[in-house]
Amino acid sequence: MHMKLTIGNIHVKDVVVGSENSFKDGVLTIDKQAAIDYLMGEDDHITELDIVIAHPGDDTRIVPVIETIEPRVRMDDRCLFPGVTGDLVPAGEGELKAFKDCCVTVVGKEWGSFGDGVIDMGGEGAKQTYWSRLINICLVGDTDEEFERHEQQKMNHALRWAGHRFAEWIGKIAKDLPVDDEEVYEFDAITKREAPKNGLPNVVAVLQPQSQMEALGYNDLWYGWDMNKYLPSFVSPTEVFDGAMISGSFMPASSKWSTYEMQNFPILKELFAEDGKEINFIGVIMSNLNVALDQKERSAIMVRNMALNLGADYALVTEEGYGNPDTDYVRCMVILEDAGIPVVGVSDESNGRDGLGQPLVVLNDKLNALVSTGNVGELSDLPACATVIGNLEALNRDGMSGSWGYDEVLGKSARDDGSIIMENNNWFCGNHISGFAAKTIVEW
Amino acid sequence: MVKVFERAGYPIVHMCNLIPVSTTVGANRMVPTISIPYPLGDPNTPEEEQWKLRYHRVGVALDALATPIEEQTAFKVKI
Amino acid sequence: MAKKVIYYVNQFFGGIGGEDTADFEPEIREGQVGPAMAANAALEDAEVTHTIICGDNFMGSNTQEALDRIEKMLEGKEMDLFIAGPAFQAGRYGVACGNVCKMVGEKFGVPTLTSMNVENPGVDMFKGYTRMMSGHNAAAQMRKDMAAMMAVANKMLRGEELGTPEEEGMFHSGRRIEKFLEYTRENTAAYRGVQMLIKKIKGEPYQTELEIPERDVVPIAEPIADLSKANIAMVTTGGIVPVDNPDRIQSASATRWGRYNVAGLDKLPNREANGYKTIHAGFDPAAADACPDVIMPIDAMRAYEKEGKIGKLHDYFYSTVGTGTTESEAARMAEEIIPYLQEDGVDAIILTST
């Protein structure tokens, strides 16, 4: 009894737009007009779409970035994101093929919002995000969603869904291609495990995806379900890899997990790598993040009891966010430690621009094993790039979390010469709390 | 902020939803509120209910300012 | 080519005189004065080209002007390192060294170094802004403090990475900054986290990346003796402002605050009535825009004032935005608000947060 997910990887050397879909000698060609026709046909709220390719090392700045997704195909032809791009069907087992080393990057042509971010493909800014290491297949668009045009918080529904459909549409090109390598994830039913795996320390991952917007439509979705109206559940890590969860539009960009990160969740992959060797990986308690104290406490209690009843000996906890979500993160770790389940936590910090601020909004001396992936407050001051995909003015105008239109000392974020000054908050998934981050925090 | 005011000698009560945050930032007198977007009145309830809640909790805060305490204290509220 | 160091001393160590000359205005001299001579002798491949002298009183009572003048003096001068002190336990001198080092670091991007005793108030104020040696409490120990400081100075000038604060005899800066690692699997947060967990499981030593600092507690203020005579002020970090946000308070990472007169108001008029709204970016503003009293409960306070439970509601409420706002900014804003409270004889404060 187990869930087995096989992901066949096809490495992409280059992506070009053309007039047919093909993959030859590592070059993925996308039929641009056909893609646009398909995506606009699926959603009449989209008024404008373009497809632009950005390569690692290009002198290119992409902003406002809304979402990233890995192009994939399910060999059984079902949708990639159950309950989002197609029928609600179980995820977590079966065969997939994935185009590696590239991502679909959803970009607002004109308008940004609080949770949107920036990617620099070259120069000093390229070290800030993992996306700078991938070929970005940018889907740049605008919509008629007038109700939120000038809102700081946007659902960005039409463009986000277009991104997921586009990843699926590109993925179909992989269907009959040979794969370069294969990742296999086998999650055995936890009551049917045998030695030697059974007998190793039982480790559970606790994920706290972003779900703090009480208005629906902005939060991460689990099988299409808004996680604000959700309580912690026990799930298989393979479900996370297989599109059961998609990213939302709320939370400062650098602390988000994009859908690409969920599809490839590095922390879960590293737990699989030790499964049967050092640990017995008993799965994921998929929790959430809340606003009110009683909601936070309820989720923490449910995580604790689920961990106890699963027989978890140790836990690894991670949150999609900082600030208010730190209360959920710290509470969850403390309640587990108090229940005799030692914890490691992975998150970023908010030390302010001067690095002297309190790193998490709640601190507790029971937290003795933490991984830090960045400081949301650090400033980046970077020269103009030759090419901008999207609209630099969004930095000044649209209430993105790490930039501003006016500051008496620093001036505006997007300067007239194309150079920018902004907080780490704005780098799209820049702190890569999901585990991609090759960055830490040290004392100066 | 709370600490700076208190250090300057002002008794201060922090009304907030997330008491653990308030404890971490070093507030000594705390009164819980009901949520972050609407600390003192749930818009899904009648205005009269909102007023009763707000009046009650602000009253608890005022009493807290006149109450001697030995350690960080979150005062209890009834509604 | 030898590197260049510029040195800062007060009037006493600058040989101007004692307390009676503490108003001495800042001056820059070529070459080395006072401790700068010993420093120069201890430098390996660098020289102290200039010494700045400033009286502690002048710096203390005209801080901004003194710093502005020193900034002008330094403009255009070559400088690889800036050194101030040692200040031992001399409070004004320690704060002056800290102020000057902070200014030089910020304005010129040049590394700075100073030394003072743990009891010096300059330690807590400036250890995050300059390299700071943990020095002795009196000038009798000048030789020791100078030797320790110059060992670090030589390392800094060579561009060597410094050891831990304990190894170097420095204070912890408390400042946390990002460090980018080479992009390898072993350096990813995922790998680091899972390996840390395995070490924790096996009981092997591991290094957490975030040490939880000790909690800073404030002495509990005395309660109000008689509420019915008390003047109570309201403060909020929930971003309640007049609809046109006249003080341009930022909706996150705020550095500005405002005070708004509510004398005679029985409740706050809402956004629709062209009254007040919230500009806080961290939550759905609908409830507070419809009824600002849910964050800034002027209505309840006024009712208690009318009933006589409190003596008076202070005529102004004070507002800023709490999200992403650094502790140092929040502390500064509180310091700026306090004089207004003192002026009106405020007795106690209610601070509401979202």
Image: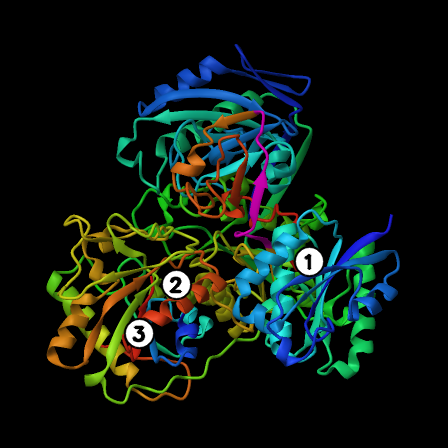
| Circle 3 residue | C343
Specify whether A292 is left or right of C297: right
Q: Tell me the crowding category of disc 1: few under 14, some 14 to 19, or many 20 or more residues within 10 angstroms, Cα based.
A: some
Secondary element type, mark 1: helix
Chain assignment, label 2: A
Secondary element type, mark 3: helix
Chain assignment, label 1: C
Q: CA distance from mark 2 to mark 1?
A: 28 Å
Residue A162 or residue C32, whichever sits in front: C32
Chain assignment, label 3: C
- Residue A259 in the image, given as x and y percentages of width and height: 49, 39
Tell me: residue C27, above or below residue A108: below
Residue C84 colored magenta? Answer: no
- Same chain, labels 1 and 3: yes
As shown in the figure, which amino acid type bears the numbered disc 3?
Glu
Secondary element type, mark 2: helix
As shown in the figure, which amino acid type bears the numbered disc 2?
Lys
Q: Residue at x 37, y 41 (%)?
A: A224
- Residue C67 in the image, given as x and y percentages of width and height: 58, 60
For marks 1 and 3 on the same chain, the one whose residue lies earlier in the sequence: 1
Residue C150 or residue A93, whichever sits in front: C150
- Same chain, labels 2 and 1: no
Q: Which residues fall within the magenta stretch?
A: A373-386
Which circle, 3 or 2, is nearer the viewer? 3
Image mark count:
3
| Circle 1 residue | C195
Q: Residue at x 16, y 48 (%)?
A: C272
| Circle 2 residue | A296
